[in-house]
Image: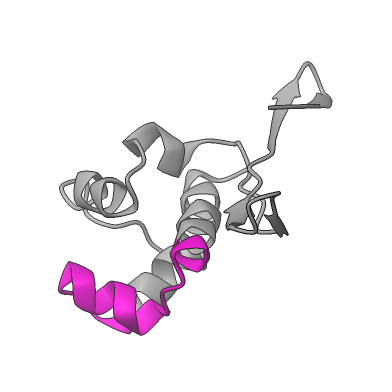
Amino acid sequence: MDVKKIFGSNLHSYRKLRGFSQEQLAEELGLSRQAVSKWENGTTMPDVMMIPAIASFFNVSTDDLRSLEYVCLEPYRGDDNILNTISVSFKAHDGYISYGP
């Protein structure tokens, strides 16, 4: 998969997890909504100097933004009735996809 597509998919997932619209994220980063949209669509990548700021905003590493691990957006309710999010990772290995925490 293309690095731009991976980054865009991860950015979209982290943005949705935080409950932000593209416009809200763009405002937080001092950019246009169109820039965020192009990143999420895999059309372009942010400037290399912007990536650490994006990672910091979402409290993830820059590696997490480029990782082939997929973030699951399915919420569940625990015993304490607090909304949590399950994170599931899939990794490609020798042509097979393995599932694991």
Q: Residue at x 60, y 53 (%)?
A: 84
Residue at the spot 63% in from the left edge and 52% down from the top edge: 80
Quarter of the image that includes the N terminus: top right
> What is the quadrant of residue 11 in the picture?
bottom left
Q: Is residue 31 magenta?
A: yes
Range covered by the magenta-colored residues: 15-33
In x, y percent, where is residue 17?
51, 61
Residue 93, position in %: x, y? 74, 18
Relative side of 56 to 100, left or right? left
Q: Is residue 43 visible?
A: no
- Residue 32 magenta-drawn? yes
Residue 89, visible in the rendered structure: yes
Quadrant of the image occupied by residue 94: top right
Residue at 56% of width from left, 46% of height from top?
Answer: 2
Q: Is residue 65 above or below residue 42?
A: above
Q: Nearer the viewer, residue 97 or 89?
A: 89
Residue at the far top in the pictured view: 94
Please, is residue 63 above or below residue 25 in the view? above
Q: Quadrant of the C terminus?
A: top right
Rendered position, 42 above or below 19? above
Residue 6, given in percent of the width and then of the height, sits at 54, 48
Q: Quadrant of residue 68?
A: top right
Q: Specify the principal SS of the magenta part.
A: helix
**Picture colour scheme:** one colour
Residue at far front of view: 80
Look at the picture and state if 99 lies above or below 12.
Answer: above
